[in-house]
Amino acid sequence: MLINTPTSDLIIYIRVVFNLKPDLSSMKKIFALLLFALTVVEFSFAQSSNTEMDYKEVSGRYGSNEGICLFDDGEFMLYGYATAVFGHYSFNKNELNFYPDKPEVFEIYATVNKSIGDSTKINFVGFDGRSLTFIRFAEDGIHQVFNEDANCFDGPFVYQLPHRTKTVTLYGQAGRDVDSQKVAYTYQNRGGYNDFIVVYSPRQKENEDFNGIITKENNLAVIKLSNYGGGTGYFKNKSDEDEQKQWKEIMEMKEQYHQSKVATQNGILANKHYQTFLQNDGDYHFDQATYLYTSKTAAENEAYFLSNPFSDNRYLRKFQKQVLTKTDGTVAASNILPKPIFYTACEDPEKSYHYDGLPKPKGNEREKIIPTTAPPPLPIKNN
């Protein structure tokens, strides 16, 4: 629960501290003291405080290994172990209201891949064993994406059909909670695409709206949030030399996040192993015959990327975001096919899925597979 100090509690506090009795005279003194307190408290905000000065006043990093960053443009970043959620915030009297960015549950990006003919390739991003997800191609039965209790992930997870599919329906849950709403979306492949990136982004606790207040303790600013930080909250870091260096890195992350959002809306650029990149138009030219964005220095870098094919950014395809239509999320057990698309289990490495688009590893390199969760959706790297 949010820890705050409503007016009634503040009155009780003043009454106890100044030993005032609850008569009319005392109540007048209480309200006079209350007005004085509201005047001198540094982080008490007015009814209408959405001004640039307020954002600048509270901006900074609160917390250490986990916490929240408040930016002076009204945006924030909630951070922790393997977590970085951006959003915006506003002031409401003495509270701060936080609105994290909420990803779409399912997204599909598509392109034409002439190198695979009439077959279809699909790269699954964000799907894992923590939530049951299903996919259906045209009038085919329903495939479970991962086996239940899947616990080892050796991506990318690429599935290939021997033909082009006309429709794709995705089934899953809106959130990670087992009781969250079941949703489904259908895609009509009217563009004749045959190469897809399918993204599943179930809502998590970090995507829920939350509140907070900023107070002072021991002459230090501390932010207390309704969902994070417990009763202690997060103290604001002093702006020393080390903190300024970290803040610079945080601002770079923020800039990259916005660049990624813009790039995603304009189309995702990925190599044949589905590693994604940000494009500098001056470094590439588009080949209409192959539908490839080819680097102008492709020949010069060939030797380097022979030993590092996963990061090869010389030949990229642009995957355009597609329109999905919400449909019935019910999945009848009788329509589910017996085998999932991907099977993976730490205790059964030989039968588990391994991406076969890269050269076969030598010796025991396959032992690099580790029990973990799937990577965050579409990690975009700079060229």
Image: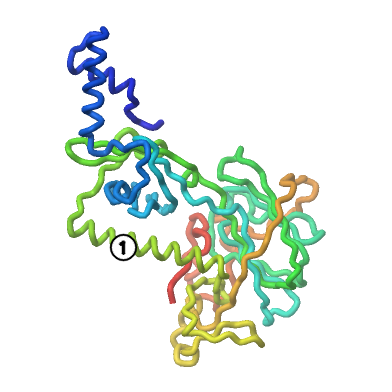
Point out the image quarter for the C terminus. bottom left
Pick whichever, 203 or 162, lies toward us: 203
Query: What residue does disc 1 label?
Result: 249
Q: Is residue 267 left or right of residue 188?
A: left
Q: Secondary structure at mark 1?
A: helix
Residue 351 seen in render:
no
Q: Is residue 75 left or right of residue 236?
A: right
Residue 117 seen in render:
yes
Q: Position of residue 271 (x, y in %)?
A: 55, 76
Which residue is painted at 80% across and 47% down in the image? 334
The amino acid type found where label 1 is placed reads Glu
Pick whichever, 298 or 34, lies toward us: 34
Task: Report the colour scheme.
Answer: rainbow
Compared with residue 110, is residue 89 higher up or lower down, i.e. above or below? Answer: above
Pick whichever, 298 or 119, lies toward us: 298
Which residue is painted at 35% across and 64% down in the image? 252
